[in-house]
Each structure stands twice: as structure tokens, then as C-alpha cells.
Amino acid sequence: MQARDEVSKEVELHRKALISYVYRLTGSYEEAKDITQECILRYLTFEKEEIINAKAWMFKVATNLSRDFLKSARNTKESYIGPWLPEPYIEESNDTSSDLELDESLSIALMIIIQTLSIKERAAYILHDILEFKHKEIASLLDINIQSSRQLSSRANKKIKNKQEPSPTSSSKHNELSYSFLDAIKTGNTQALINIFQHDVQLLADGGGKASALKEVLYGDNTFIANFLIDVLKKAFKNQEEKLELKSTYFNGSLGLLLFYDNKLETAYSFEINENKIAKIFVHRNPDKLELFK
């Protein structure tokens, strides 16, 4: 029988991976933590003699709990007001240094695409392509055969590649563009924004019906969206600049920006970069999701 210390070490060994797995499946960081905790509690109270592989056992429980959550949350998501963005994923270390490695597997852009896959497709993709599980392991977790696991992973990859921007970027370039966006917003420099935006840049703002935000994805040329952003901030903070503060922070695998008004977090910005330009601007305004930064 395993000693208590050994069981605790086993649990802690897989906690972070479980959270990141469930987060990618569900798009909810809070749910990922809750489901992971439930997995751990079940593992701690289960007869260890019946568990051959602790990691596989916990990931299977996490997969089933995530599937149940996604089915129950489907109606809520379908009735969501305006564009939906996944909750911010904030590393527990809370390291905000600018030299952190870019992790595109946690990007808001990829998260949005993953959510368009079927539950089994996204599980197979995350387990195989991101967490490096073998198809034999995935087949056992999803109660399918190995060939089906390969097919699910292949199908998911094709769908993602069809929707994903083709040009990856470096961490240093992502940081440079993020800071350029920050400076342009602070100074109200429309031309500086135009210069760092792709011509067909998009803006997605998630207010969830609880904060003012666009109810549709904003499409347009870079001049239109640059002017829109500057105008919105001018109207919101006219003659109250002393109460406005913009900070950089690291979430969802890259540098993003937080906007505070009178010491209250109002907005979180993150970006998709393509061909060394900002291709998409993701704007978190839903106060429930902003709570995760506290």
C-alpha cells in the first residue's frame, strides 16, 4: 500500500498538467481547477490497488468530468451575449518578466479554435500534440481503439491548420508589439496603432452582457480599428488620465496588457500576431473573467 507521502507526491506531480489539460478542453480556468481538485480527491479516496497507472487514471477522470461540464454548459455558451473568449490562464508562479518563453499552445487564438472541435477531437489533439501522450494511452482514456485515436488527432490537426494563422512569431517580437500597443494607447497615437496592425486586423471583445463591449466581432481595416480604439478610450477616460493605469502582464502564454481605472481592473488585452503584425485583438471585459487576475 502506498505511503501518504508517496500519494501526495504522485498527486502534485500531475496537478499542473491536469489543470492545463482541462483548461484547454473547457476554456474555463476556474472549472479546470475545480475538476482537477475533484480528480485528486477521488484518487485519494480510491483503492490504490485497483489503479495500475495513477496518471492515466486521473486524466481519464478529468476527461469524463470535463465532458459532463461541457454538455451542461452548452446552453449557457449558446446564449452568451457577444463574442465568447476563454477565461484568462494565469501561471501560478505569476511571473510577469518579459523574457518568458512564448507558449502558443495556451494562446487565446488557439483556444478559440480548439473550442470548435468535438469533445473527442479536442481531447485527442491536446493529449497527443500538446501533452505528448501516445495513441495507445489516448485510446484507453477515451475508450476508443488506437486507429480511432489517430483519426481524431489527424482530423483535429487539419481543422486547426485550416483556421490558424500560418506565421508563428518569436517571444521578443510579441513583446515588442505588445509594448508598442501599450505606448500607442497611452499617448493616443492612432498612427502608431495603424503601423503595428495588419491591414485586416480584427477586434473581439468579451463583456458577457455584464460590461459594455461590442456584441459582434469588429472587422475593418487597420485605420478604422485604430481610430475606434483611441476614440473609445478618449470617451471613457476624458480628463481623468490620473485615474487610468496600463500595466503589462503574462497570461495565456504571452505578454498581455491590463487596463485599470481608479485602481479597478477594467480590461485585459491580448493579441494574435501574424507576419510581425497584430492580426487580432482579444479584449476581456467580463468582470467574472477579470476576477482571475486578482
Image (cartoon, rainbow, N blue to C red):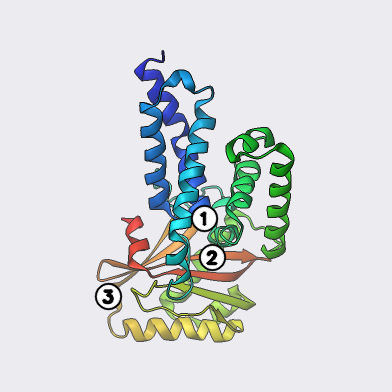
Distance from label 2 to label 1 (Cα)? 9 Å
The residue lying at 67 percent from left, 35 percent from top is 134
Residue 149 lies, in percent from the top left, at 69, 42
Q: Which mark is residue 271?
A: 2
99 and 211: which one is in front?
211
Residue neighbourhood size for the residue with mark 1, other residues' Cα within 10 Å, grouped as few (<14), some (14–19), many (≥20): many
The residue lying at 49 percent from left, 27 percent from top is 54
218 and 240: which one is in front?
218
The residue lying at 53 percent from left, 60 percent from top is 108
- Residues tagged 2 and 1 counted as in contact (Cβ below 8 A): yes
Residue linked to disc 1: 254
Q: Amino acid at mark 1?
A: Ser
Q: Amino acid at mark 2?
A: Phe
Mark 3 falls on what kind of element?
Answer: helix
- Residue 164 in the figure: left or right of residue 86: right
- Residue 45 in the figure: left or right of residue 66: left
Mark 2 falls on what kind of element?
Answer: strand
Mark closest to the chain's N terminus, 2 or 3: 3
Asked which quadrant contains residue 212, the reply is bottom left
Residue 184 lies, in percent from the top left, at 48, 75
Residue linked to disc 3: 242
- Residue 133 in the figure: left or right of residue 215: right
The nearer-to-camera label among 2 and 3 is 2
